[in-house]
Image (spheres, rainbow, N blue to C red):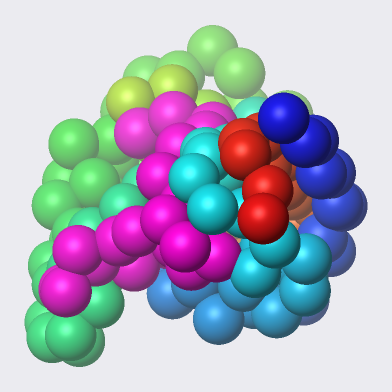
């Protein structure tokens, strides 16, 4: 069994759902050594989240953003307002979606479905760079 861990710094992105699968794969040049295993991806922030969703139709990330903006509205009477009107809704969205995803590894590749991709869900208007911890564990060749 082998372990592999990398830290990945993502460039700042606007609010929304952003496909990051290619960046995650590029950061893991050793992934090809794994015959079978798991990749755990963790975002080290409280106002961003990670999810796996459809990677083909650009309407999907737009619709997800619209839906979550409706669920966690900025005009709600939040007590935590010191960091701006988008901060507390960002915490609510991150709590709902989650801070990590786990993807199987098969024959050196991420075993995502045909239409699946890993998304960074940026919930702040200007969230800044985001840090990910990528941890792979499994049997190597």
- Residue 139, above or below 58: above
Q: Pinpoint residue 85: horizontal percent, then vertical percent.
A: 54, 43
Please indicate whether residue 100 sits to the left or right of residue 53 in the image: right
Q: Is residue 60 magenta?
A: no
Q: Residue at x 29, y 40 (%)?
A: 73
Closer-to-camera residue (87/7) = 7
Q: Where, by quadrant of the figure, is residue 13 drawn?
A: bottom right
Answer whether residue 9 is visible to the viewer in this image: yes
Q: Which residue is drawn at 14% across and 52% down?
A: 67
Please indicate whether residue 53 sits to the left or right of residue 19 in the image: left
Q: How many discs mark residues in the rendered view?
A: 0
Q: Pinpoint residue 105: horizontal percent, then vertical percent.
A: 47, 51
Q: Is residue 108 magenta?
A: yes
Which residue is at the far front?
Answer: 141
Q: Which residue is drawn at 72% across and 30% down?
A: 1
Closer-to-camera residue (27/74) = 27
Closer-to-camera residue (23/136) = 136
Answer whether residue 89 is visible to the viewer in this image: no
Q: Residue at x 67, y 55 (%)?
A: 141
Please indicate whether residue 1 sits to the left or right of residue 66 in the image: right
Q: Where, by quadrant of the figure, is residue 81 drawn?
A: top right
Q: Pinpoint residue 130: horizontal percent, then vertical percent.
A: 76, 56
Q: Pinpoint residue 57: horizontal percent, then vertical percent.
A: 13, 86
- Residue 41, above or below 125: above
The residue segment tinted magenta is: 97-120
């Amino acid at each position: 069994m082998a372990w592999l861990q990398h830290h990945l710094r993502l460039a700042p992105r606007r609010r929304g759902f952003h496909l990051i699968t290619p960046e995650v794969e590029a950061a893991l040049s050793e992934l090809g050594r794994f015959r079978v295993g798991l990749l755990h991806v963790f975002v080290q922030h409280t106002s961003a989240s990670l999810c796996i969703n459809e990677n083909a139709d650009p309407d999907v990330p737009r619709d997800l953003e619209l839906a979550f903006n409706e669920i966690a509205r900025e005009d709600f009477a939040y007590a935590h307002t010191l960091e701006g009107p988008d901060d507390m809704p960002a915490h609510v969205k991150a709590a709902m979606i989650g801070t990590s995803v786990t993807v199987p590894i098969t024959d050196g590749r991420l075993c995502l479905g045909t239409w699946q991709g890993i998304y960074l869900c940026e919930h702040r208007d200007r969230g800044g760079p985001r840090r990910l911890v990528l941890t792979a564990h499994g049997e190597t060749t």
